[in-house]
Each structure stands twice: as C-alpha cells, then as structure tokens.
Image: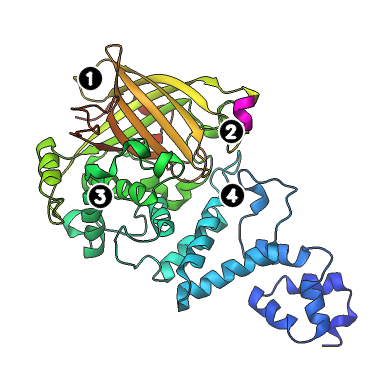
C-alpha cells in the first residue's frame, strides 16, 4: 500500500480508472489516504473517467444539457451500479426504474457522421432488462407509471410473439391493452381528449403504453404482408429509436424546426368494429370481450407537413417550460393509400413542450372546409425520435355523435412516425 502512494496522485488516479467502480469503492475503505484520494480530490477526473469507461454516454452531450454543467459523476455512477444490484438481487424497484429512465433520457443523440453509432446507455438498459426480471411483473395498469413509461419506450421489443402463437404473457398484454384503449371512459375533456393527466400537464404513460401495445401487436399480425418500406422504424430498431434525432432527415432540418416537423410522415390507425365498441362499453367492459383471436382494422395514411410559424413573443416565451423550444404551428396534407382516397385533406396543428417536459403534438384534419378529426399525442423518447408520436384520434368538436364527445361513439389510437423522403412516393401494394 505504501508503494502505491509513492507515485503521483495523478498516476494513482489514472491507474484506478481501469478498475470496476465497486473495487474503487472498496479500495477507498482501506485507509484514510485511499479515502481522500477517491473522494476528496480537487477535480472529478477519476469518477468521470470511471463513468465514461463503464461505458455510459457522456451526459454533457444529452439534449438540453450544457457542456459546462457540473455533474455529480460519483453519485450518478453509484446509482446506476446500485441499480444493477437491485435488478439482479432485488430491492427498491422505483430506484431501479429511475436509473433506467434516466439512462434513456440521457442517451446520446444521433449526430451527423455518427448516425449508425449505438448508445452505450441504451445497450446498458437492454442488458439489464434481458438479464433480470424487471419486466416480469403482472401486466396490470395499476402498476407504477415509471414502469408503464419504460414499457412504452420498449414497445414490446424484448417480448417476442405473434398473434395466437405468442407467449401467454404477450397475449395478456394485448388483451389488457385493448380493454384500456377501447374503454371510452379513458377519454375525458379534463385530459383534453388525449393520453394526458388532468389539464394535460403531464403524460399518462399507462394509456400511452396500452396504445403502443395494441398497434405493435397489430403490426406483427401483418407480418410479411406489411411492406417493408412502410414499417415504423421502432419495429426495426427497438429502444435505439427513442434517441433524439434518430428520425429520418431530422439532422438536416431547419434551425427553427426544433421538433423535426417538416417532411413526410406515416400514420398507423387501428380501430375495432363500431358495433363491437358499443357492445364492449355498454356491457360493462368485460375482461374477456377481446379474446386472442379478435381482429382489429388498421389503416395507413401519409402526411406531408411544413412549418408555418414559430412563437417569438417574449412574454409568451418567458412562461414556457423550455423557452429554447417555442411552440411550432404547422400545416400540410394527409391522405390514405386506398384507391378511393385520391384527394389530400388539409392538416393544421401545433407542437409544444408540456409542463412535465414531454413533447405534445396536436393537429386537426379538415374535410370540405370543416374540422373533422382531432389528434392528441406525445413524442416517444427524445426530440425528433424515430419512435414518433403516439396518441388518440377523435372527432374535432367532441359533440354528440363524435368519436369521443359527451356521448362517444368511436375512438382510434394512432402512431405517427417520420418517413424517408422517398417513402410516400412509393405505391402501396394491393
């Protein structure tokens, strides 16, 4: 031990960067000089090096982080190493979920020239989930919103299985998700008709997760019949698709377009038969109504969006959760791929940051000069993520006869994702 301290402290610290953080912590308990070297250094070189060598993504490069910010490298690394212990040996699940969600939020965004580099944070999260029983809880929506948020980001990417051949666990997720999605009591004016908490101050992740599960399983049912060019990026890239700027062409967007609005989009809409929806809601929301062989309808639509304006009023910006991301107003067109749908319908909407920091998309489609359909959704993952926007599509006025008004008649979950520039020009196969 004495010979170790003969060398300069810089060399001793550098030697320790090649050790596991647990070994460094154990070494700090051997004597006072070791404790001082580990925990009382004038800089954070040792813990910063240990953090980045683990490896984790550099949090200073995360979206919204300042390169000059002071990070508690020691505390951050300890929480994540401890989370590994909880995942494998048991402990406070909330602490584990906090660490996993933090890792996803701080995953390195894609950048020009490094579009194909994977995130160390995402790889760590996936490894933890694969090697532990973190996701093995019963698929009930009385669970923690943290776990629902994590599952919404995963989109069943770690849960294989298709249709009636899927494992019982996956089929249970689908049944419960359908019950939640088609229960019209979950669409309220106080939540602004979307998957939000009261007054739309935050995201209701259990609702978002249910929508993700329903659409993901329907996409799997299509299998090879679903054209490859039109598949959502999330179904190909999994959790990596939640990274900021992973959506096509968003690294080349206009500086004003912080949300990556402009360009081509694809939209998946799923819905059950109108008569089934009425029977389900009128018969007491029976758990067995949507059995494993039940089939929903799905439609694909394409959108071409353009930026119309960006909020610049200083008084408005001063009241925003994030003044660097002012509300965006956009317009564009939407149409289906069916031969009967030859005309584009106008679309107008807004993108803004919610009080809880999530990104909300609101837009309306117009038919014959009248508002027809209203959509409310939330971005999955970071800004401009390939995972896109998930939400609810309802009647524009929420009146009697509308899909989700005072006397609701229909509701359609949707998943909106950015498409490659050439994709909307391709022909949808018969």
Front residue of this view, candidates 358 and 172: 358
| Magenta stretch bounds | 315-319
| Badge 2 vs badge 4, beta-carbon distance below 8 Å | no
* Residue 171 appears left or right of 385: left
Q: Sequence order check: which comes first, mark 1 or mark 2?
A: 2
Q: Sequence order check: which comes first, mark 2 or mark 3?
A: 3
Q: Secondary structure at mark 1?
A: loop
Q: In the rendered image, which quarter is residue 271 located in?
A: top left
Q: CA distance from mark 1 to mark 2?
A: 36 Å
Q: CA distance from mark 4 to mark 3?
A: 33 Å
Q: Sequence order check: which comes first, mark 4 or mark 3?
A: 4
* Residue 163 appears left or right of 20: left
Q: Secondary structure at mark 3?
A: helix
* Residue 20 showing in the rendered view: no
Residue 400 point in image, percent of width and height: 19, 27
Which of labels 1 and 3 is toward the front? 3
Front residue of this view, candidates 232 and 223: 232
Q: Report crowding for label 2: few under 14, some 14 to 19, many 20 or more residues within 10 A (C-alpha).
A: some
The C terminus - image quarter: top left
Q: CA distance from mark 1 to mark 3?
A: 31 Å
Q: Is residue 278 magenta?
A: no
Q: Secondary structure at mark 4?
A: loop
What residue sits right under mark 1 in the picture? 341
Decide: is 101 above or below 319.
below
The N terminus - image quarter: bottom right
Magenta residues, dominant SS class = helix
Decide: is 389 above or below 150.
above
Residue 309 point in image, percent of width and height: 53, 19
Q: Sequence order check: which comes first, mark 1 or mark 3?
A: 3
Label placed on residue 108: 4
What residue sits right under mark 3 in the picture? 180
């Amino acid at each position: 031990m004495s010979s170790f301290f003969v060398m300069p402290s810089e060399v001793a610290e550098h030697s320790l960067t090649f050790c596991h953080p647990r070994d460094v912590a154990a070494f700090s308990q051997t004597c006072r000089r070791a404790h001082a070297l580990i925990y009382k250094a004038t800089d954070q070189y040792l813990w910063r090096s240990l953090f980045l060598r683990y490896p984790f993504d550099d949090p200073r490069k995360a979206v919204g982080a300042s390169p000059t910010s002071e990070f508690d490298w020691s505390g951050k690394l300890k929480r994540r190493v401890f989370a590994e212990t909880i995942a494998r040996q048991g402990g406070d699940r909330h602490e584990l979920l906090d660490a996993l969600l933090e890792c996803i939020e701080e995953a390195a965004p894609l950048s020009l020239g490094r579009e194909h580099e994977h995130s160390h944070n995402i790889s760590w999260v996936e490894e933890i989930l694969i090697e532990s029983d973190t996701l093995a809880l019963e698929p009930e929506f009385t669970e923690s919103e943290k776990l629902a948020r994590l599952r919404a980001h995963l989109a069943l990417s770690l849960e294989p299985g298709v249709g009636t051949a899927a494992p019982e666990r996956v089929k249970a997720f689908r049944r419960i998700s359908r019950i939640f999605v088609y229960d019209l009591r979950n669409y309220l004016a106080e939540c602004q008709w979307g998957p939000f908490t009261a007054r739309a101050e935050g995201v209701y992740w259990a609702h978002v997760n249910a929508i993700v599960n329903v659409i993901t399983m329907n996409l799997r049912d299509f299998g090879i019949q679903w054209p490859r060019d039109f598949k959502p990026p999330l179904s190909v890239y999994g959790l990596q698709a939640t990274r900021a700027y992973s959506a096509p062409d968003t690294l080349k967007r206009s500086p004003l377009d912080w949300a990556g609005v402009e360009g081509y989009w694809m939209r998946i809409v799923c819905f059950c038969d109108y008569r089934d929806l009425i029977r389900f809601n009128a018969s007491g929301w029976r758990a067995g109504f949507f059995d494993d062989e039940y089939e929903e309808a799905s439609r694909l639509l394409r959108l071409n969006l353009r930026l119309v304006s960006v909020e610049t009023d200083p008084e408005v910006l001063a009241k925003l959760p994030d003044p660097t991301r002012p509300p965006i107003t956009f317009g564009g067109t939407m149409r289906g791929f069916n031969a009967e749908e030859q005309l584009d319908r106008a679309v107008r909407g807004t993108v803004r940051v919610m009080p809880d920091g999530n990104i909300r998309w609101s837009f309306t489609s117009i038919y014959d000069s009248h508002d027809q359909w209203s959509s409310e959704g939330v971005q999955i993952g970071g800004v401009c993520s390939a995972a896109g926007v998930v939400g609810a599509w309802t009647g524009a006025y929420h009146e009697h006869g509308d899909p989700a008004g005072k006397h609701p008649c229909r509701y359609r979950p949707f998943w909106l994702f950015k498409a490659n520039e050439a994709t909307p020009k391709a022909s949808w196969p018969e």
